[in-house]
Image (tube, rainbow, N blue to C red):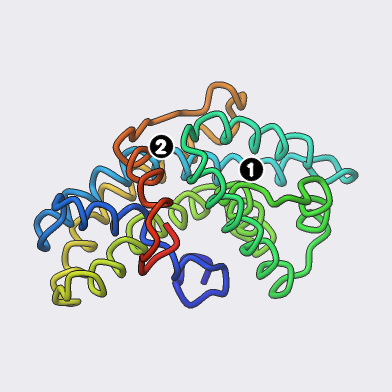
């Protein structure tokens, strides 16, 4: 449910950098889309998965009061440092705020209330995702898998709209990426207890640059 584009967390309005890649001619068909998705999940997706897993684990190990908000705030700060693009930082917080709002409506939980109070401007999306996953009874590996699924399916869905690709072929490409995403989710879960400054920071400079350019467009189909 958390990774479903129909969940009212706002992800359906974002292409994860795909719209800019299409405009630049880097993604033109199913093959180049699959290459784009493989790169995205191995970089920004893997970083998001690590932070989602760590946020989920933070609530597992938190004292009863306050419910893990100190570590969640530290994770939020570290994720900010790993997101050099101002446009992507703003997008992440917007999505995190909306995700947290939706999760609190679906599954009221005092940890989610505490997170909303601690970060009134909105937590980064992976931090909100990890906290929401725990509130729904999921563990760190499932939180990481949801983050990776979101990183892949958002651009894949956007590609169908932007390029008119065959949705069956697009989902076949997603299926081929599943073993890779499973390995990345397991790796993220293994690092969930690590100090926050030791969590991974897999860079994707071209996504950062494209996000800044995309934010200047007067006409665009997706918000990012």
In the image, 62: left or right of 37?
A: right
Q: Nearer the viewer, residue 59 or 38?
A: 38
* Label at residue 115: none
Quadrant of res 151: bottom left
Q: Position of residue 219 (x, y in %)?
A: 36, 66
Quadrant of res 62: top right
* Label at residue 57: 1
- Give the residue at x 78% y 35%: 70
Pointer 2: residues within 10 angstroms few (<14), some, or many (20+)? some
> Farthest right residue?
65
In the image, 67: left or right of 32?
A: right
Q: Nearer the viewer, residue 127 or 15?
A: 15
Q: Which residue is mark 2?
A: 187
In the rendered image, the quadrant that contains the C terminus is bottom left
Q: Secondary structure at mark 1?
A: helix
Pointer 1: residues within 10 angstroms few (<14), some, or many (20+)? many
- Give the residue at x 15% y 50%: 26
Q: Position of residue 222 (x, y in %)?
A: 39, 65
Q: Calculate the distance from the C-alpha at mark 1 to the C-alpha at mark 2.
A: 14 Å
Q: Position of residue 108 (x, y in %)?
A: 78, 69
Q: Nearer the viewer, residue 21 or 45?
A: 21
Q: Nearer the viewer, residue 220 or 155?
A: 220
Above or below for 95 versus 221 = above
Above or below for 173 versus 185 = below
């Amino acid at each position: 449910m958390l990774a479903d584009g129909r969940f009212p967390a706002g992800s359906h309005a974002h292409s994860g950098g795909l719209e800019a890649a299409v405009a630049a001619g880097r993604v033109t068909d199913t093959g180049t889309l699959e290459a784009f998705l493989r790169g995205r999940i191995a970089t920004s997706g893997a970083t998001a998965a690590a932070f989602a897993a760590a946020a989920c684990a933070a609530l597992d190990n938190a004292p009863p009061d306050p419910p893990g908000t100190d570590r969640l705030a530290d994770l939020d700060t570290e994720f900010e440092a790993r997101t050099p693009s101002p446009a992507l930082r703003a997008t992440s917080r917007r999505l995190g705020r909306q995700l947290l709002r939706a999760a609190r409506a679906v599954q009221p939980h005092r940890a989610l209330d505490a997170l909303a109070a601690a970060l009134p401007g909105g937590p980064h999306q992976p931090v909100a995702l990890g906290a929401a996953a725990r509130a729904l009874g999921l563990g760190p590996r499932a939180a990481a898998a949801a983050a990776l699924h979101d990183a892949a399916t958002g651009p894949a869905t956007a590609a169908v709209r932007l390029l008119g690709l065959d949705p069956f072929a697009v989902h076949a490409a997603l299926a081929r990426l599943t073993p890779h995403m499973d390995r990345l989710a397991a790796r993220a879960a293994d690092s969930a207890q690590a100090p926050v400054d030791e969590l991974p920071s897999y860079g994707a400079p071209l996504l950062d640059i494209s996000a800044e350019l995309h934010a200047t467009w007067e006409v665009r189909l997706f918000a990012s």
